[in-house]
Image (tube, grey):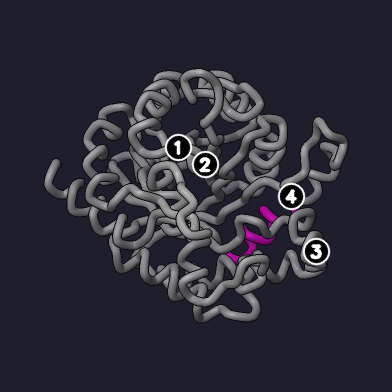
Amino acid sequence: MHPLLEQLINELPVLLDGAWGTELQAHGLQSGECPDEWNLSHPDQVEAVARRYLNAGSRIILTNTFGANPIRLGEFGLADKALEINHQGVLISKAAAADNALVFASIGPTGKLLMMGNVNEADLADAYSKQAETMVEAGADAIVVETMSDLTEATIAVTSAHATGLPVVACMVYDSGKDKDRTMMGVSPEQATDELRNAGADIVGANCGLGIENYIPVSNRLHKASGNPVWIKPNAGMPEIVDGQVIYGTTPELFSSHLPDLVKAGAGFIGGCCGTSPEFIKAMKKKLTETK
């Protein structure tokens, strides 16, 4: 395992950040806009999101680069801006973090399915390699491959990230199957752990898809399969549409009430995904302090 992560494991649990998309929307991001492009056009607002999480207690903050691979940016006509967007995304989070938090650069899926023939493995490898190389050049402390459903795509992204020499975290979305313990493609936590570790992931985990209580058994299985602390960023419950708006009903207090059980299940790096905010991170910090 990379020395940076070995050091962090001695300081568990480590509090991560929460959702970025909804926070950017609160700063004016409109539906249909490319969030990653805001690294160029609205850097102050992007930095404000990172700073809010830092002030809430996050020890690791991510970057506004989730959809900044060239393939996904191509849907917005921004493929030629990929390197600049990723570089700026890292610099913005680093400016907010200063020496008070680590910056783990975010890599998300391309949105194209290999099984549908919309993209091939060589295209994915090229796109993820370019994205990851730019992140290391900009000074990221580590790379997080997240919100993956296709294990082949995830392993390609992890391989590309691992080649940079940075620590790598790899997360799949588990929200399918009878017990909600499979990816959309039917992959189990044990299968994912084996392949992601072989591809170069130092830490494995799960994010998005489910609420925090549902990720407790998933975390337990990931922990047993990997032998290492798990990275978990659950949603704030399951979303509902109310008056045309997506609403997550879980409160920060209810969310954080599940933290002790999640930690017991092997989660060592804990934050939030869709529907969470700096208020959730504050509540989580308070709960972790109370239970130490």
Q: Amino acid at mark 4?
A: Ser
- Tag 1 or tag 4, which sits nearer the N-term? 4
Which mark is on residue 169?
2
Residue 7: x and y in percent read 36, 44
Q: Which residue is mark 3?
A: 79
Residue 283: x and y in percent read 23, 54
Q: Which residue is mark 1?
A: 210
User: How far is disc 3 from disc 4 in space, using C-alphas?
Assistant: 14 Å
Secondary structure of the residue carrying tag 3 is helix
Residue 2: x and y in percent read 48, 41
Foreground: 199 or 15? Answer: 15
User: How far is disc 1 from disc 2 in space, using C-alphas?
Assistant: 19 Å
Residue 213: x and y in percent read 33, 33
Which stretch did the figure color magenta? Answer: 130-139
Answer whether labels 1 and 2 touch (C-beta < 8 Å).
no
Taking the image as shown, residue 186 lies to the left or right of residue 24, namely right
On the question of residue 30 being in view, the answer is: yes
On the question of residue 7 being in view, the answer is: no
Foreground: 112 or 133? Answer: 112
Q: Residue at x 82, y 37 (%)?
A: 121
- Tag 4 or tag 2, which sits nearer the N-term? 4
Q: Residue at x 62, y 51 (%)?
A: 107
Q: Residue at x 73, y 66 (%)?
A: 83
